[in-house]
Amino acid sequence: MNPQRIAIKLHTDRDLGLHELPPFIGVFHRFIQEGAVPGLLIDVADYAHVPDGPGVILIGHDVDYGIDRVGGRSGLLTLRKRAGDRDTAALFRDTLAMALATARAIEGDASVSVRFAFAEVQIAFPDRLAAPNTAESAELMKKELEPTLRALFGDGAVVEHESASDPRRMLTLRLGGGVADLDGLLAGLEEA
């Protein structure tokens, strides 16, 4: 199993209201102009009017970033769209590095007041052919990701099959119980 796409959601430390999403349009346009975050960035799409929707999306060639409210929880969703020939663990590390760099850029922007919490991280595989939402696929993905997750988030990190109750959803894992902060995760990725 070698998925070509992976999505990582870093939750905010508090839920954002719909009125807090429009400033991200300007932030994301600045990110494009300044090359402030990884990836070839192309455009910004505003879906802030959609309840529990995708929010504001920074669209790129190989990666998309979005401040979303899907599932009633706001966060930074990073979708890696082109994996190349990387294995799942390498794709995860690369995508997490992109997500963390973007989280740092967002936290450093004075026009939005957002902080991210790292006690829980969602990892989804939109590539349904390569990673169907089955218990077997979830176990294979856990096995591939666990060494990296434990190295970054500690031995208390627990990986659960979040989407197990609905086979129509994409395969989604939830990392919980980990203790980490932004600087620690960035340092850990450099060592990995």
Image (cartoon, helix red, strand yellow):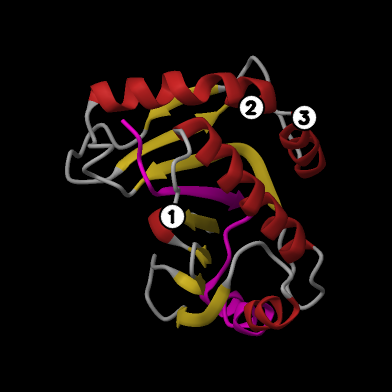
The earlier-in-sequence mark between 2 and 3 is 2
Tell me if residue 11 is in the magenta stretch: yes
Type of amino acid at the residue the image marks with label 1: Arg
Q: Secondary structure at mark 2?
A: loop
Instruction: Mark 3 and mark 1 in contact? Answer it, CB < 8 Å.
Output: no
The earlier-in-sequence mark between 1 and 2 is 1
Circle 1 packing at 10 Å, graded few (<14), some (14-19), many (20+), is: some
The residue depicted at 47 percent of the width and 82 percent of the height is: 46
Where is residue 165? Give x, y as percent. 22, 34
Q: Is residue 177 above or below residue 2?
A: above
Type of amino acid at the residue the image marks with label 3: Glu
Task: Look at the image and tell me in which quarter the N terminus lies.
Answer: top left
To which residue does mark 2 refer? 178
- Mark 1 and mark 2: span between their CA atoms? 28 Å
- Mark 3 and mark 1: span between their CA atoms? 24 Å
Instruction: Mark 2 and mark 3 in contact? Answer it, CB < 8 Å.
Output: no
**Left or right of 191 in this view: 118:** left
Q: Nearer the viewer, mark 2 or mark 3?
A: 3
Where is residue 145? Give x, y as percent. 50, 26
Question: Magenta region: which residues?
Answer: 1-27
Q: Nearer the viewer, residue 60 or 44?
A: 60
To which residue does mark 3 refer? 191
Type of amino acid at the residue the image marks with label 2: Gly
Residue extending furthest toward the top? 155
The residue depicted at 20 percent of the width and 39 percent of the height is: 166
Where is residue 144? Give x, y as percent. 45, 23
Residue extending furthest toward the front? 85
The residue depicted at 58 percent of the width and 65 percent of the height is: 16
Q: Secondary structure at mark 1?
A: loop
Disc assigned to residue 82:
1
Where is residue 158? Give x, y as percent. 52, 21
Circle 2 packing at 10 Å, graded few (<14), some (14-19), many (20+), is: many
